[in-house]
Amino acid sequence: MKNIWELVSNIGVDDQVSSTVLWKIRLLNQMALLALVLQVFSLLILLVNFHWVFLSISLSPIPLYLFIWWLQAKKKYILARWVMILSSNFLVFLYNFTFGNLLGITSALLAIILLDLIFFDKKWHIRIQISIVTLTYAACNYSNYYHTPPFGELVVPAVSFIIFFILAAAVIIVIKLFVDELSLQQRKQDQLLIALRKKQKQLEGSKLLIMKQNMNLQKSNEELERFAYVASHDLKAPLRNLTNYLSLIKARMDKLSTDKLLQYVNIALRSGQEMFDNIEDLLEYARLSEEKKIEKLNLGEVIKEVLFKFDAQMKAKNATVFIPENMPRIDGNRRQLSSLFQNLIENGLKYNDSEKPNIQINWERQEDAHLIRIKDNGIGIKPEHQKKVFEMFKRLHDRSKYKGSGIGLAICKKIVEEHQGEIWIEENPDGGSTFALRFKATSIVAPQTKERLLSLTL
């Protein structure tokens, strides 16, 4: 029974229509089915006083209901409503003309006015319908006053009461259907709103992802531009020197002394080595984005492993490095983080002319991050250069005094960014340099009740 109800209710339903039109389509279908059932029910009751007139009038609306469903299926929604209301007015007048006012004409017309208000939104529609109901009411009263119903004697008071009860029940059921349809459409709208909000969140997430991808693309383009600049300038310089001195050796082979020849060869070799170092550093820089292996690392262990690589250099310089015993744990790539601290510690030793180079590493827990500082007592970096030093091949000193390709800090910056962190240089009034690193806190390290430093003097 429920399946039949839903099947009839959905006649002519189209997903393209608005929710307001949708519930009106369903309500009209349900009313036609309800009227059909009540018509059959009233026919069974009237069989008590069976007469061919009762039978014909009771069966006459059935084709109308079928016609209304056909109009609904053809998506002639407005026409179907007009047919329903006009036929209702006609049937009221027909019943009144045939049987008189014993069948509750006034109640039926009030029910039709209620349907007018439910099914029609435009004022001129409602006005026409109310005018038709008024004319029907006037015609019924005129008929009752000047015309004797031919079959009025067939309707006994009991039958009149039963039909009135059926009409009242029909009105109540229509109102219930109306409220149920409104509730159903409201639930559907709520579900649609929830779905739209979820979709909106997904779109916002997609938008953020696209923005992030665009930023990465822009970043990649900037790196490509820097690579192009490096290829056209920094790599050409040692290659040019190498070519020039080899050309000199070739052109003056017979005239050059052994010492001069060795000098040219050494310059050419240094230029070749410089170009080789630059290419190696560029390759290391380019490989940083390819390494995706992430693991939970104790930064203290990573730094200790790095320090053993500087065994000879630290002994030669009488250098000391202090690190806290309880360093934080973060999610990261071991090789990249080793390279990060190796470059920073190496800079602290290289650019340091003091008799006892000293590097202090400390960290503090912030709200959602670990802040690590690496402080040295070296020559320091002037404030106007503190941002430029993170660019590729930006050297502040002559290569003859401090060796290196000038890409170390650029590698550090890229490694930190690959770990969604930040790196910058802080002001150091006591001299030297202080590099600050901020990493996202992926785990909570137990607070230190007493700071204990591990001193490594090799």
Image (cartoon, rainbow, N blue to C red):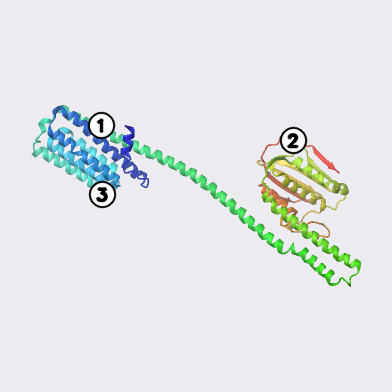
Of 140 and 407, the residue lying toward us: 407
Residue matched to label 3: 124
Name which residue lies at 68% across and 61% down: 228
- State which quadrant residue 262 falls in: bottom right
Q: CA distance from mark 2 to mark 3?
A: 82 Å
- The disc, 3 or 1, on the residue closer to the chain's N-terminal end is 3
Other-residue count near label 2 (Cα within 10 Å), few / some / many at <14 / 14–19 / ≥20: few
Q: Neighbour class for label 1 at 10 Å: few (<14), some, many (≥20)?
A: few
- Which residue in the rendered view is the most extreme toward the right? 258
Indicate left or right for 213 with 103 as reference: right
Please name which of the two marks, 3 or 1, marks the residue nearer to the observer.
1
| In this picture, residue 34 sits left or right of residue 340 | left
Secondary element under disc 1, as helix, strand or loop, is helix
Spot occupied by residue 142 in the image (x, y as percentages of width and height) = 12, 40
Relative image position of residue 13 (x, y in whole percent):
34, 43
Rounded to the nearest angstrom, the CA distance separating label 3 from label 1 is 30 Å
Type of amino acid at the residue the image marks with label 1: Ala
Q: Are marks 3 and 1 in contact (CB under 8 Å)?
A: no
Of label 2 and label 3, which has the lower sequence position? Answer: 3
Labelled disc at residue 448:
2
Q: Position of residue 328 (x, y in %)?
A: 72, 39
Kindly tell me whether residue 167 is visible in this rendering.
no
Tell me which amino acid carries mark 3: Trp
Q: Find residue 55 and name its label.
A: none
- Which numbered disc covers residue 169? 1
Residue visible at 24% across and 43% down? Answer: 67
